[in-house]
Image (spheres, rainbow, N blue to C red):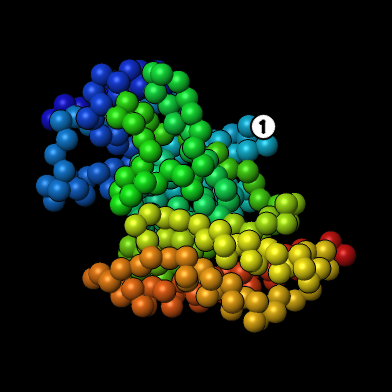
Amino acid sequence: MDFLAPTSWAEALECKAAHPDAVAIAGGTDVMVELNFDHRRPPALLDLNRVPELADWALDDGRVRLGAGVPYVRVISELGHLLPGLAMAARTVGSPQIRNRGTVGGNLGAASPAGDSHPALLAAFASVEIGSVRGTREVPVAEFFTGVKRSVLEPDELISAVLVTPPSGPQQFSKIGTRNAMVIAVSAFGFALHPDTRTVGTGIGSAAPTPRPAPEAAAFLAGELEAAGLWGSRGALPATLATEFGRRVRDAAAPIDDVRGSAAYRSHALSVMARRTATWAWDAYRDENRSAA
């Protein structure tokens, strides 16, 4: 197995173009597990840890440009105020050691249906910045995943960054596992209120072949909030509305039975998580109004 270690983004793209079968590695929290269990034996590894362009974040034209090599621990410590939903999800990832090494870019590259960052990114309407020697393109996260552990990435492409607009309203994230730490999600859900556009963001994890939004449920909730005048009045969220939203999120999923949980349990858990996260976020939205008053 060859080991490629570029020291710049341009060199990394040249390496990927020359070795399209090379597997990119940053934190290695997914790749090294597969190598250790002999589930994967690529002809080359492309180490991206020496590429400085991937290792930082910045505000760019109103969006956070999160470099693909920024570890979860920095998302938590540096971006909790700008990307609260993603920071919540990052806190649930693995152990402190894994959060110090693992990255959102690597999580996207693995394209697992159970990736912890995916529901939060979907709810935030984030995009993935992808580069190659042919140029750069931007893909909405909702269009990035194409199947179980498959994505739109071409053989010569690498993820350079994630682009996320800081929210105009509260965000939430919820995850169900067989225990509270060091666990792959049985199911997960991301939720975001976008009062500036009076829309709702949703993200379903570990309950379909790919991470996916629940657009019909989101449009239903946003429409009911509009019809009742609640976006402006910030009145209480009716329990019946939150429950119906949860049902519609459940119906947007396509879970399976596996060793971590049954399809029936995943469906039920999603309906509960959707109801709870919507309620928590709406309560926070109301509290913002009371604090401003």
Mark count: 1
Q: Is residue 98 at least partly visible in the picture?
A: yes
Point out residue 60 in the picture as x, y percentages from the top left corner: 63, 32
Q: In the rendered view, does 100 fall on the left or right side of 200? A: left
Residue 13 found in image quarter: top left
Q: Which residue is pictured at 33% across the width and 37% down the height?
A: 26
How many C-alpha atoms fall within 10 Å of the one at disc 1: few (<14), some, or many (≥20)?
A: few
Q: Which part of the image, by quadrant, shows the C terminus?
A: bottom right
Residue 108 found in image quarter: top left
Mark 1 — residue? 61
- Under mark 1, the amino acid is Asp
Point out residue 238 in the picture as x, y percentages from the top left corner: 70, 79
Q: In the rendered view, does 286 fall on the left or right side of 47? A: right
Point out residue 34 in the picture as x, y percentages from the top left corner: 19, 48
Q: Which residue is pictured at 23% across the width and 70% down the height?
A: 259
Point out residue 256 in the picture as x, y percentages from the top left corner: 30, 68
